[in-house]
Amino acid sequence: MDQNSMHIPLQYKVGTEIIETQALLDSGVGGRFISTALARKLGKKWIQLSEKIKVFNVDGTPNKTTWISHMVELEFKIAGKEFRENFMILGIRDESMILGLPWLCYHNPQIDWETGEVRFLPKRKLRIRRFTGILNCAPVEVLIRAKITASQELAHQQQEVKKEIDKLIPSYLQGYRDHFEKGKAERLPPSQSYNHAIELKPDFVPRNCKLYPLSLAEQKEQDKFLEENL
């Protein structure tokens, strides 16, 4: 036995009978295993695995003879803590049960490797009080005033754009600043003395255009925008 393993006392049930034995606790093993002899002694139904599992030796080479095809459920107790877990049935000769690294990681017991003592700490329960206040040190009235409308937000964005334009345009081009504004390009040109009417054909008949209704979410957003800005 190496420094990564030790035997620990374990109790298991066979019907109503409680049997005390020793299980090998080994951090170098990758699973929970039970000997074929003990699995038969339990008298429980064996559960067939969907796929057989190849067993590897300690040096990483595949074992030539051993495959795992079944597992069995076992009720057992260690250091006063009760367990109900599945063990893979393996033809191990020297040990009746082996608990490997996955079991150690999941339950995370406190182990004294010198004395062989195993302890399981009780799970902590965190009680979080329900908080209904405001997680901010500012006065409530300040928080209320912090809300802005859509029109205020648009105005703020427009101010930011103007500041950026002033920084981007060199001083010698400031006289042509209007030509750099995107808003000017999106508006109609100013009225001139050469305006003329566009006459329609006498036989022209206006067509009824299809109306596309808004979805419920779109209608709510539109109503909200109009209510805030009109």
Image (tube, rainbow, N blue to C red):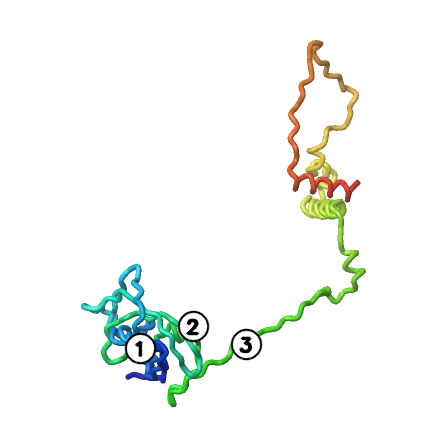
Closer to us: 109 or 48: 48
Q: Quadrant of residue 78?
A: bottom left
Q: Position of residue 113 (x, y in %)?
A: 38, 86
For mark 1, give the secondary structure.
strand
Q: Quadrant of residue 22?
A: bottom left
Q: Residue flagged by tag 3: what amino acid is it?
A: Arg
Say whether residue 75 is left or right of residue 173.
left
Q: CA distance from mark 2 to mark 1?
A: 18 Å
Q: CA distance from mark 1 to mark 3?
A: 30 Å
Closer to us: 159 or 47: 47
Which tag, 1 or 3, sits closer to the chain's start? 1
Q: Is residue 10 above or below residue 63?
A: below
Report which residue position mark 2 lands on.
Answer: 106
* Quarter of the image where the C terminus is located: top right
Closer to us: 176 or 206: 206
Report which residue position mark 1 lands on.
Answer: 97
Q: In the image as oriented, which residue stretches furthest toward the left? A: 64
Q: Is residue 2 above or below residue 225?
A: below
Mark 1 closeness class: few <14, some 14–19, many ≥20 residues within 10 Å:
many
Mark 3 closeness class: few <14, some 14–19, many ≥20 residues within 10 Å:
few
Q: What residue do we see at 77% from left, 59% from top?
A: 143
Q: In the image as oriented, which residue stretches furthest toward the top? A: 202
Q: CA distance from mark 3 to mark 2?
A: 16 Å
Q: Residue flagged by tag 1: what amino acid is it?
A: Met
Report which residue position mark 3 lands on.
Answer: 124
Q: What residue do we see at 71% from left, 9% from top?
A: 202
